[in-house]
Image: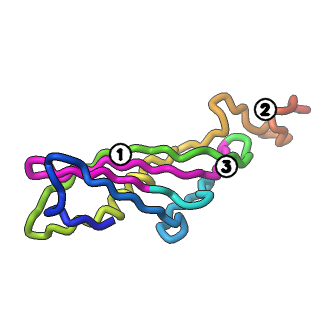
Amino acid sequence: MRVDIRRLSEDREMVLQESWDPAERDLNADHLAYRGPVVVEAMLRREAGIVRVRAHFSGQRLMTCGRCTKNFSAPLAEDFDIVFAADMSSPVLELDESLREELILSYPQTILCREDCRGLCPKCGADLNSEKCGC
């Protein structure tokens, strides 16, 4: 997303929307991949010397639980606020890398299929969510 900040108004927001290919943007990570595109909507407004960007990401993710190793699907719905200096000497603002970084930084450190996932037995490998351990 590129925007000429001279076109931004203090009176109302400019809305931009793009569909990102997760493979092209290198968004997939260990145990987290996207099903289909990631939709990015950005609302921009120029304010006293700054450009305020409110971004919303949506899509569908396929993840692997860190405890029971089952794959599951989960919706992507993330919102971010980013502020840039409104530098009129270089009025074109490139948003893609900043938005991409914000999205990646929001990835969970531990992926769980559900909060109370009991995981696998460390001895026999039984899925403790669906069966009793035979150890």
Residue 10 point in image, percent of width and height: 14, 48
Callout 1: SS: strand
Question: Residue at the spot x=65%, y=34% of the render?
Answer: 114
Q: In which quarter of the image is the C terminus?
A: top right
- Nearer to us: label 1 or label 2: 1
Q: Distance between the residues labelled 1 and 2?
A: 35 Å
Q: Name the residue under label 1.
A: 80
Residue 2 point in image, percent of width and height: 29, 67
Q: Quadrant of residue 126?
A: top right
Query: Per the image, is 117 magenta?
Result: no
Q: Rate crowding at label 2 as few (under 14), some (14 to 19) or many (20 or more) other CA atoms within 10 Å.
A: few
Callout 2: SS: loop
Residue 112 located left or right of residue 101: right
Question: Residue at the spot x=63%, y=31% of the render?
Answer: 115
Q: Rate crowding at label 1 as few (under 14), some (14 to 19) or many (20 or more) other CA atoms within 10 Å.
A: some
Q: Which amino acid does label 2 sit on?
A: Asn
Q: Is the Cβ of the residue at disc 2 closer than 8 Å to that at disc 3? A: no
Callout 3: SS: strand
Foreground of the two, 91 or 111: 91
Residues shaded magenta: 40-66
Residue furthest front in the image: 11
Q: Mark 3 points at which residue?
A: 64
The rendered magenta stretch, by its main secondary structure, is classed as strand
- Model colouring: rainbow
Question: Residue at the spot x=15%, y=67% of the render?
Answer: 91
Residue 66 point in image, percent of width and height: 65, 44
Q: How far apart are marks 2 and 3 (CA)?
A: 15 Å
